[in-house]
Image (cartoon, helix red, strand yellow):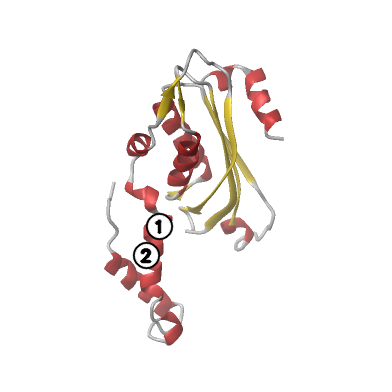
Amino acid sequence: MKKEFNHERIKEAIRIILEELGDDPNREGLLETPDRVARMCDEVFEGMRYTNDEIAQMFNKCFETEQNRDLVLVQDIEVFSYCEHHLALMYNMRCHVGYIPNGKVIGLSKIARICDMVAKRLQLQERICSDIAEIIQKVCDTEDVIVIVEGEHSCMTARGIKKSGAKTRTAAIRGLFDTDHELRNEVYNLLK
């Protein structure tokens, strides 16, 4: 993965976009916009610097546990991302992550950090689910993971079809959550 963004190239690209939109990048209100956008890219696309394996290594903070095989569920983790098709904001996004421990449990804040880092990429909501599930499987050494993401997409609400309030829900269902329908239903009931 690319570890650093070229700020000068991003700044120049933003200047070109501003000119092509018919504005003057040298006017007072826009003078520092290219630099601000380049710095924003560092922040909102940070996850693009890392593979799923690298994210798993960064947040691999687990604790040994007795043979606890009870459901762990963290819900309502707020994230935002950008659609790779339109570079449009995906917002009001909430991630719900559940897993069955296999001898160890992950620090709960690490689940939120994983969700945040995965979302900080040009993404598809479906891929956000599968990337989070893959990383949780690696870190927790368990196949039994469920990730549900719901959110709104400005590529659908603010442009194109312009259907405000339309929500998209996606799920990555792995291991026991795929085969044990009662367990999967327990997660969905807890999320109500």
Q: In this view, does 19 lie to the left or right of 67?
A: left
Q: State the CA–CA distance, disc 2 to disc 1.
A: 7 Å
Percent position of residue 153, x then y = 58, 54
Q: Mark 2 points at which residue?
A: 39
Mark 2 secondary-structure assignment: helix
Q: Closest to the observer: 22 or 114?
A: 114
Residue at the extreme bottom:
27
Above or below for 86 versus 59: below
Q: Mark 1 points at which residue?
A: 43
Residue at the extreme top:
67
Percent position of residue 2, x then y = 28, 50
- Tell me whether the residue at label 2 lies in contact with that at label 1, contact meaning CB atoms closer than 8 angstroms: yes
Residue 72 occupies which quadrant of the picture?
top right
Percent position of residue 21, x then y = 46, 77
- Is residue 18 visible to the viewer in this orientation of the structure? yes
Kind of residue indicated by mark 2: Arg
